[in-house]
Image: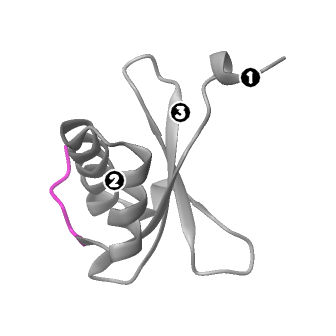
Amino acid sequence: MPLPKWTVHPTRDFKRQLEKMQPDIFRAAELEAAASWVLSRDPHRGIQLPGSSVWFYGLDDETSSIVANVYYTFNDRSVYLLSITAVPSPSDDPL
């Protein structure tokens, strides 16, 4: 298990979106901690948006279902969490 190399900084927008998306403060903290753990070790694990310095990483739950996408950017020292969006579960599909 590699040690963290990058420092993670959630932006105000990220925090606001996370609170709106996940009102349970403990679950919200888990999502932020999961993103921070992975991205502080290797921000290249995500996918870079074409023609942009923004990347995204899908956070999964214990069933390996993606529950949220985290959008971020980084440099040689820091990762900046820009945004988070919920991914609807298949059971949320009206069809």
* Residue identifier under label 3: 66
Residue reaching furthest to the left:
3
Q: Of label 3 and label 2, which has the lower sequence position? A: 2
* Residue identifier under label 1: 93
| Residue 73 within the magenta-colored segment of the rendering | no
Amino acid residing under circle 3: Ile
What secondary structure is the magenta-colored segment mainly? loop
Residue 89 location (% of width, % of height)? 60, 25
From the image, which quarter does the C terminus lie in?
A: top right
Given residues 22 and 36, the one toward you in this image is 22
Amino acid residing under circle 2: Glu
Mark pair 1, 2: CA separation: 23 Å
Q: Of label 3 and label 1, which has the lower sequence position? A: 3
Instruction: Tell me the SS state at disc 2.
Output: helix
Amino acid residing under circle 1: Asp
Given residues 1 and 78, the one toward you in this image is 78
Marks 3/2 in contact by CB < 8 Å: the verdict is no
Residue at image point 57% right, 74% down? 54
Residue 78 location (% of width, % of height)? 29, 79
Q: Is residue 49 above or below residue 86?
A: below
Q: Residues within 10 Å of mark 1 (few under 14, many from 20)?
A: few
Residue depth check, mark 3 versus mark 1: number of the one nearer the observer: 1
* Residue identifier under label 2: 19
Instruction: Tell me the SS state at disc 3.
Output: strand
Mark pair 3, 2: CA separation: 18 Å
Residue at image point 27% right, 58% down? 41
From the image, which quarter does the N terminus lie in?
A: top left
How many numbered discs?
A: 3
In the image, the segment drawn in magenta is 1-7
Marks 3/1 in contact by CB < 8 Å: the verdict is no
